Amino acid sequence: MKYDDKLVPILEIDTEDNMFRLSLEPDPNSLIAAIQSVGLINPPVLRQKEDLRYRIVCGFRRISACRHLGWHEIDVRLVVGDVSELDLFELAILDNRSHRAISVVEQARGIQKLEPYIPSENRLETLASLLGFPVNKKVFQKIRALGRLPEPVLAEVLNNTLSFEAAVHLCPFSPKEALCFLDLFKGLKLSQNKQIEIITLVQEIAMREDLWIKKVLQSSDIKSVLERPDLNRNEKGSLLRAYLKRRRFPALAKTQERIVKALKALRLNEHVHIIPPPYFEGGPYTLRMTFKNQDDFSKRLKTLDAIAKNPDLKKVLEPY
Amino acid sequence: MISRLYIDEKVKDEPAALTIQERLHTIPATVVTDASRVHEALADSTDPVAQGKRVLFLTRNRGPFLRKCPGTRSYICCGYHILNIGTYCTMDCTYCILQAYFHPPVLQYFVNQEQLYNELDHLFSLKKPPFYRVGTGEFTDSLIWEPWTELSKTLIPYFASQDRIVLELKTKTSAVGNLKCITHNKKTIVAWSLNPPSIIRSEEHGTASLKARLAAAAQCEAWGYPLAFHFDPLIIYKDWENDYRQLVRELFATVSSKNIVWISLGSFRFMPSLKQIIRKRFPKSKIIYGEFIPGLDNKMRYFKPLRIEIYKKMVAWIKELAPDVVVYFCMEDEEVWKETMGFVPKDRGGLPKMLDDSAARFR
C-alpha cells in the first residue's frame, strides 16, 4: 500500500463517514491530554473520496481529540493508488489490533462490514483470523448476531452491565425491545444467568399473554419492585425474578405456595426438613434429619411422630 | 414434495428401490456410496429440518426392522412394537419430535424388505406372547409413503395371513386409497392422530384437515378395518375445552365406537432440545409456552394438575358418547391413571394386556 504524508484541514475530513469505524462513538478524552502533551505521534490514515473530502480509515479517536483541541490542520497518511475496500478494512482492523485487543462489539461490527467482501467457503476462517476470535461456527454466529443490536446496548456489553451471552439472547428482539431490557438491567445487579433467565421469562410471558415485550416490562408489578427505595439492586433482582416466575408458571406457583403453607403448619424445626419431589411430578419425598447424639435422635423421632399424626401432612403429600 | 432422490449404492438393485425410482423418475436421482453425502447436502441448507423433508434417501435398515418401543421406567408404557419402515415425515408439525430426534432429519426409506418380511415371519411363528401390537407410525407417518411404495398393499395381506399380531397404521393423512379391496382379516388397525381444526391449521402444517381425516376413517370403517384414534399431543390453549369437546363429538358422529379398538390420550411433551427448534422454525407458535416442567424421563411435560384436568375432561367426553371404548394414556404414571380413570392398569393385568385384549376382540 502506498501513502502520501500530508497536512490536511480537519474540516475536509468527513467525520460522519463511519465506513471503516469498528468501535462505538469514540471517547477522545483519554487521548486529549496525551496529544496536548506530546503531540500527534501516529498520524491517522485517510482515503480521499470522490467528493474530494477525506474518509477516515484509521484514527477516529485521534481526529476527534485533535478537533476537541481546536486544531485546524492535522498530519495524516493518505492512502493512494488502487487499493480495494477490503484491504482498507484489513488495515483498519490491524491498526486497532496492533496496540490493543479488539472488543467483541468491534468483532461484531467487523463481521457485519466485512462479510459481503469475503467468499462464503472460507468466511469463518478469514474473519476469525482477522478479527481475533476462535474458528468456531457457534461463536461466530453469536458474535455476528450482536451486530444487530442498537449501540446503547452494545455500549453496556462493553461496560459489563449486560453480559455477552445475555446480549446474544437479546438479538432476536427489535431494537426498541432490546433497549427496554437494557433499561431494566441498568437498575439491577444480575449475573449472566439471571439476565438470561429474565429475558426468557419476559419473552415467554409476552408470547403466552399476547402482549408486547414493552407492555410486560412496564407492568405495574414490575415498576413497583423497581421503585422500592428500601431494596438494593440485588434484592430487586430477586423479587423481580420471583414475580416473573409466578406469572410464567401460575399453576406451579400456586402449588408451591400451598406447599410452603402446609409445611409451615407442620411446625418443622431446623433439624427436620421435608423436601417434595421436583415439580411435584412424582417420585419420593425426602426427609432430612440432623442430630448429634442419641438423645437428639430420640427427640427427632418424637418430632417425626408428631408430624405423622398431623393432618396437615396430607396437604404436603397431596399437593393438588 | 420430494425434490431430490439419493440411492444407497448397496441397495440400488433392490426391487423396492427400482419401483420407487420408476415412480419418481422425474426427480433428479444420485447414487451415493455413503450416507454422509446426503447429510452434507442437507447441512448446506438454511433450514436442514425442512430440507430433509424434500430429500428422499433410499437405503437399507442396518438394524432390526422390529423393535420394542423404548418407553421409560418412570411412566406406564403400552408395550408397543415398532416396525421401522423408514424415518421422518413429509408433513411439518410444529411439535414433531422427529425434528430433534434424527441428526440430521432426512426422509429415509428402507428398501431391504426381504429382511423386513423375514423378521415378520419369525414373529408370526412365535407362540409367545399370545398377542402383539406392531406399528409403523413411530419414526414416520405410516401412510406418507403410499404414493411411491404402495407398501400397505403387501404389508396388510401379510398380517392378514395370521391371527395373533395386529398392525397399526398411524397417520395424519387421508391417503387410504391403497387400502381398498385388500384382504386385511381385521389384523390391520387404521389409526389417526386427531386435534381440533384450529390446532391443525396452526401447528400441523401440510397434514390432512380434520374433515378429511375423519372421512378417511369412515371409509376404512366401511371397508371393515378396525380403527384407532390418538388424541396426542393434547395441547392446552385458550379454547381447548370447547375445541376438544367438539372434536370428540365429531369423531363419534363420523365413526361407530364399536369399530374403535382404542383411543389414546397424550399431552404435549418434548425433549428440551426441541424448544429451540420450534422457536426458530415456528416463531409464531405458542405451544412451547405452556406450563411445562421437566418430567421424570427428562422430557418437558405440562405440570401434572394441568394434565390431569385435560385428561379428566377428555375421558368424560369420550365415555359419555362411547362408554365401552378402551381409552389409555401414552406414558403417564399411576397417579394420573387413578385420578382420571379411577383405576391403574396393573389392576386389569397391565396396559399391554388391556390393549391386546381389545385388539383380540376384532376377529
Image (cartoon, coloured by chain):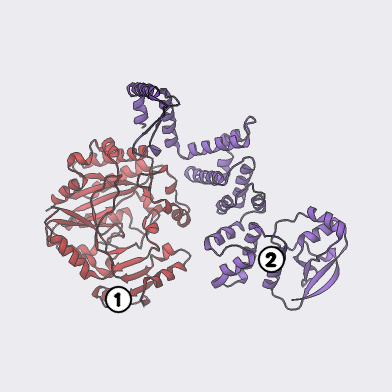
Is residue B56 positioned above or below A182 on the image? below
Give the image location of residue B243, x and y in percent: 35, 44
Question: Residue A155 or B222: which is nearer the viewer?
Answer: A155
Crowd class of label 1 (few under 14; some 14 to 19; many from 20; radius 10 Å):
some
Is residue B16 positioned above or below A161 on the image? below
Q: Residue at x 61, y 45 (%)?
A: A180
What residue is shown with label 1? B10
On the same chain, marks 2 and 1? The answer is no
SS at badge 2: helix
Give the image location of residue B267, x and y in percent: 34, 45
Chain appearing in red on the rendered image: B
Give the image location of residue A158, x and y in percent: 66, 52
User: Can residue B181 be seen by looking at this rendering?
Assistant: no
SS at badge 1: helix
* Residue A93: image tag: 2
Chain letter of the residue carrying label 2: A
- The amino acid on which the numbered mark 2 sits, given as a three-letter code, is Ile
The answer to which quarter of the image holds residue B282 is bottom left
The answer to which quarter of the image holds residue B108 is bottom left
Q: Residue at x 25, y 45 (%)?
A: B328
Chain letter of the residue carrying label 1: B
Q: Residue at x 77, y 63 (%)?
A: A59
Locate residue B143 relative to residue A89 in the image: left or right.
Answer: left
Locate residue B264 relative to residue A109 in the image: left or right.
Answer: left
Of the chain colours in the picture, the one used for chain A is purple
* Residue B67: image tag: none
Query: Where does the N terminus of chain B fall, quadrant-wise?
Result: bottom left
Is residue A52 positioned above or below A228 on the image? below
Question: Residue A199 or B73: which is nearer the viewer?
Answer: B73
